[in-house]
Amino acid sequence: MVAEVRPCRESPSSRSERLTLTDDQIGEPMEDRPDFVPLSTWIERPVDEMRSRARAFYENMNRRRTVRDFLTRPVPRDVIEDCIRTAGTAPSGAHMQPWHFVVVTDPTVRRRIRLAAEAEEREFYSGRAPDEWLEALAHLGTDAEKPFLETASCLIVIFARRYGSGPKGERRKHYYVQESVGIATGMLIAALHEAGLATLTHTPSPMGFLSSVLDRPENERPFLILVAGYPAPGARVPDLNRLPLDGIATFIEDEPVED
Ligand SMILES: Cc1cc2nc3c(=O)[nH]c(=O)nc-3n(C[C@H](O)[C@H](O)[C@H](O)COP(=O)(O)O)c2cc1C
């Protein structure tokens, strides 16, 4: 059973938002819980500012494109670190934070990743992938050649931690691992874009080789490779359209929110 409570600070436009309490928290006032702290990080913004921030964020994110031709120019490590910090702020099932990010710039390791990825992709494009999948990919112009694995500034290989360990070393189950890592990855892509870098979400199929090449533990599974860096001069991208709002959202509305 869950109970509804109001957010700690309520603004006119947050009236429809609710937080939920689980069974073991019901009946205990929030302020009496020693493991709770006041929500001090939330900033209430005037509606006009909210509007302009939402619009500006959308407009910037709408400039993001998947890039497949990169410069070799290095990216400062602290920029990548901050972007990964952002990914680490993602919500996760039961706050298990079931992710790990491996940043690879070492040319020898990148060569191994490229060779292994291209071997898998050659199989994929020359028979393993069903025709329907290949047809869906055709308009992107991708093939088994993956030079960006060696040329782009860095590879961020994202691993999903299927389980962790408790204080006594016991196995601790993780919940909603794929969802959590997907959200963290989206936030990482947004952070890299915001910082002025281009990315490519790359999923060699299959990608189990990443565990051995990067020497990752048994509880982790490779999720995807995020290639990050600067686009090559003259880089071109497929001419794609994004679905309009009414193609991706349905509103089931109460009365309109007043400004
Ligand atoms: C889960 C996922 C896997 C992807 N895998 C690949 C990939 O292996 N190779 C590739 O070139 N692009 C890959 N992409 C990029 C998509 O093709 C790209 O996002 C899509 O065509 C839309 O283009 P845009 O990102 O420029 O909007 C992947 C994207 C996602 C979300």
Image: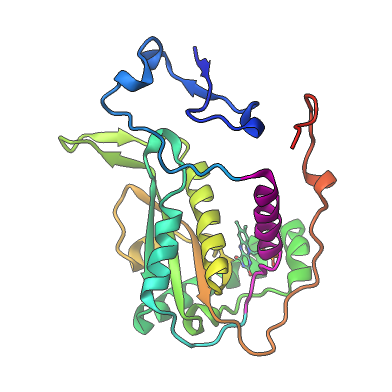
Q: Looking at this view, is 156 or 149 the one in front?
A: 156
Q: Looking at this view, is 61 or 146 the one in front?
A: 61
Quadrant containing ligand 1:
bottom right
Q: Quadrant of the C terminus?
A: top right
Per the rendered image, the range of residues in magenta is: 46-68
Against 45, is 185 above or below? below
Residue 256 at x, y percent in the picture: 80, 30
Q: Residue at x 55, y 42 (%)?
A: 44
Q: Residue furthest bottom?
A: 233
Against 257, is 222 above or below? below
Q: Residue at x 71, y 62 (%)?
A: 59
- The answer to whether residue 110 is visible is yes
Q: Quadrant of residue 101?
A: bottom left
Against 142, is 102 above or below? above
Taking the magenta stretch, the answer to whether it contains residue 220 is: no
Against 248, is 81 above or below? below
Q: Residue at x 62, y 77 (%)?
A: 68
Q: How is the image coloured?
A: rainbow
What secondary structure characterizes most of the magenta part?
Answer: helix
Taking the magenta stretch, the answer to whether it contains residue 49 is: yes
Q: Quadrant of residue 158?
A: bottom left
Left or right: 5, with 250 as reference point: left
Left or right: 53, with 178 as reference point: right
